[in-house]
Amino acid sequence: MARVWIRAVLASPDTELAGVVDRVPAHAEALVHRLGVPGTPTGHDLAALAAATRPDAVVDVTVPEAHLPVTLAALALGLPVLGEKPVAATVPEALRLAAASEAAGELFMVSQSRRYNRHLDALRHCAHLLGRPGILTTDFFRAPHFGGFRETMAHPLLLDMAIHPFDTARWLLNADPVSVRCEEYNPSWSWYAGDAAATAVFEMAGGIRYVYNGSWCSGGLETSWNGAWRLSAELGSAVWDGEGPPETELHESEGRLPPQSGTGSDDGAPEGVAGALAEFVHALRTGVTPTGEVHHNVLSLAMVTAAVASARTDRRVHIEPLLDEAVAEALATATGPEAARLRAWPSTGEALAVTPKGLNRAG
């Protein structure tokens, strides 16, 4: 992913690569040579390289377990951060980062890169035309042979992949999760050590249901990496195969809605990682809150955590008490202004629903 992000930074007309940090300096040096920018400063210490290069922001492409220390360090240096998903390794760590962002007065945005897709944007536009949503479903069936850590994980599908559709469901419905009932299982032919298949039923705000049905060991007639989507709403239904334009049909209508190309935004807008980078830069320049701002993103990780907990315990898991427990755990390790911000939250739900003042300062 470092290669993907560096290419995006180099390709963007709005960004320049100030430097590359890696725990192993030789890795950073080899990377910038491989990508054709051998003169780029490199190092193993973020603070030292930041002092030497004076960057405007940090892109964190580390493993999830490193998101907390790397982002805390960057925020402490007065640098806004654009980080890879998930926001952190755990929900308590994610809440600490939300509080740290508040305390520092700096933006921390999480890149949910699969949101930046013109056909997904069109599906969201269709959803608005169909009135009150009732049921949203995602089918995801693929059979990748990754090798490495994914094939030894306890919950490979839920932990490594499901956060993308879970986050997308929140965005499409403009609704947050209330509870989930999830079952995990492993087909007899699976080459994964952990459960590579899952079915999760989320209750979303307003009584909407979101149903995720997926497998990472189902070859033949595979879905898109984005999955296959269906929305059933008050006035009709919409479907999206994850690749082409969505299709929409109204109740009691002889025809279908005309093809939707988006919400009126530029169809030439950057997609994927490039889209996330563009929104991050726009947020820093204008002060507009980006869709992946940390407070807005914590609940996507909470959906994954709750689904895993439900599968482990064979029961419905409610999101609110999960968040309350996470705050208590976060307070046990947080210090200084970060801890003070956590203690000042009226409630976890209220804190995550409103972007605090002082973030996203225009510059």
Image (cartoon, rainbow, N blue to C red):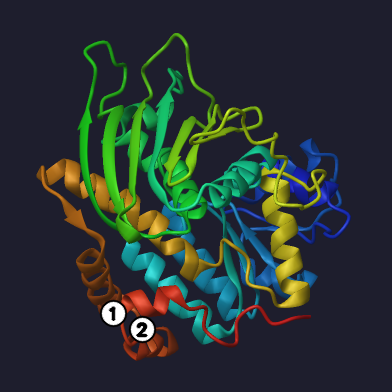
Residue 140: x percent and y percent? Answer: 42, 27
Circle 1 crowding by C-alpha within 10 Å: few under 14, some 14–19, many from 20: some
Q: The C terminus appears in which quarter of the rendering?
A: bottom right
Q: Is residue 78 left or right of residue 42?
A: left
Determine which residue is flagged by label 2: 342
Which of the two discs, 1 and 2, sits closer to the camera? 2
- Viewer-nearest residue: 279 or 196: 279
Q: Is residue 111 left or right of residue 267?
A: left
Residue in the image at 70% along x and 78% along y: 287
Q: Amino acid at mark 1?
A: Leu
Is any part of residue 341 visible from this angle? yes
Secondary structure of the residue carrying numbered label 2: helix
Q: How many marks?
A: 2
Residue 9: x percent and y percent? Answer: 78, 52
Determine which residue is flagged by label 1: 331
Q: The N terminus appears in which quarter of the rendering?
A: top right
Task: Determine which quarter of the picture holds residue 262.
Answer: top right
- Viewer-nearest residue: 242 or 256: 256
Task: Determine which quarter of the picture holds residue 155.
Answer: top left
- Viewer-nearest residue: 77 or 240: 240
Residue in the image at 31% along x and 16% along y: 191
Q: Is residue 136 left or right of residue 243?
A: left
Residue in the image at 48% along x and 44% along y: 235
Check the image and report above or below for 298 versus 180: below
Q: Amino acid at mark 2?
A: Leu
Tell me the distance, in whole angstroms, between the alpha carbons under discs 1 and 2.
7 Å
